[in-house]
Image: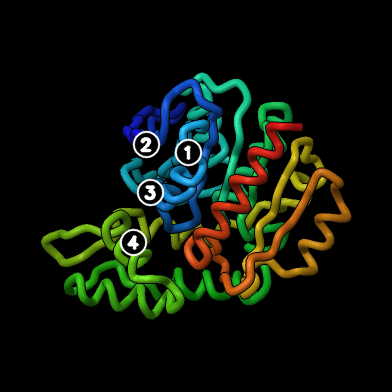
Amino acid sequence: MSVRSVFFTNRSGVRLHTLQYGATGATPVVLLHGLRAYAQTWAPLAAALGDGYCCYALDQRGRGLSDWAPSDSYRTDCYVDDLEDLVAHLGLERFLLVGHSLGGANALEYARRHPRRLLALVIEDIGPGSSSAGDGAARIRREMQQTPLVFADWNAAREFWRRARPGLAEEGIESRLAHSMRESPEGIVWRHDQQGIAEARLSIEPTDLWPAVRALQCPTLFVRGGRSDFLPPATVAAMLQANARIRAVEVADASHYVHDDQSAIFNQVVSAFLRESQDR
């Protein structure tokens, strides 16, 4: 599968980077990563979808190869503006949309703003209230407060990830080292705007996602990790009651990071749902 970088400048002058997997003209899929992730996190899903799809994995502002931005712009409405600008830059009419955690919140809000643009929607391990209350929200706030900005060397950075994500395979750790960290004269530092992202996460009130959930007009799949501390089963049940277009699946032995912990199962579930939604 071909891979190429696409850069564009958004409405506020922020230069954003996207990885395109596959050939232009195939069914478009836009992929939105989580809070501290990066475009390459979606490479296994793009490979699983195959040549029938053209996947666009966005480095959301402040991450990957995209520009950093003011910390008060690391909020849902600005991320959704960026997604609108990407869709306009690519000339997409209707497309499939997948988002994890922060990216899932942004995807839901995009769906609320543009209900007729989406062929189908996949949301990984986030729902209304996830970012505001509960063990997962507390964990992420704690991580934002305690994450170092600089590491002495690559071994120290590797040990950080082993402690932070004890269930993550070595492949996942190496991916994070390669794509979310870099060498500097001070030591090993983050590629993303760790300080700005932390400030935003600790000070900006999370968006209420219930209006978006209730307004969904396309086939939508919520994927929950069986060990998730972020998306409670009760919230999934309430969403299923709120909107008949919603389906849900729980992946056993997976945390909040389903696509990392159970990559093969996640990719199979998402691929099957996207293909099924196109056949309707």
Rendered location of residue 192, percent (x, y):
34, 54
Q: Which residue is the site of mark 2?
A: 1
Q: At label 2, which amino acid type do we have?
A: Met
**Quarter of the image containing the C terminus?**
top right
Q: Which residue is the site of mark 4?
A: 176
Q: Earlier in the sequence, mark 1 or mark 3?
A: 3
Alpha carbon distance from label 2 to label 3: 14 Å
Q: At label 1, which amino acid type do we have?
A: Gly
In the figure, residue 9 lies in which quadrant? top left
Q: Is mark 4 on a helix, strand or loop?
A: helix
In the figure, residue 223 lies in which quadrant? bottom right
Q: Which residue is the site of mark 3?
A: 40
Please name which of the two marks, 1 or 4, marks the residue nearer to the observer: 1
Rendered location of residue 74, percent (x, y):
49, 49
Alpha carbon distance from label 1 to label 3: 16 Å
In the figure, residue 181 lies in which quadrant? bottom left
Residue 257 appears anywhere in the view: yes
Q: What element carries label 1?
A: loop
Residue nearer the viewer, 16 or 267: 267
Rendered location of residue 145, percent (x, y):
44, 73
Q: Is mark 2 on a helix, strand or loop?
A: loop
Q: Which of marks 1 and 4 is nearer the N terminus?
A: 1
Q: Name the residue: 64% across, 46% down.
A: 272
Q: Name the residue: 23% across, 72% down.
A: 151
Q: Which of marks 2 and 3 is nearer the N terminus?
A: 2
Query: Is 110 situated left or right of 44 in this image?
Result: right
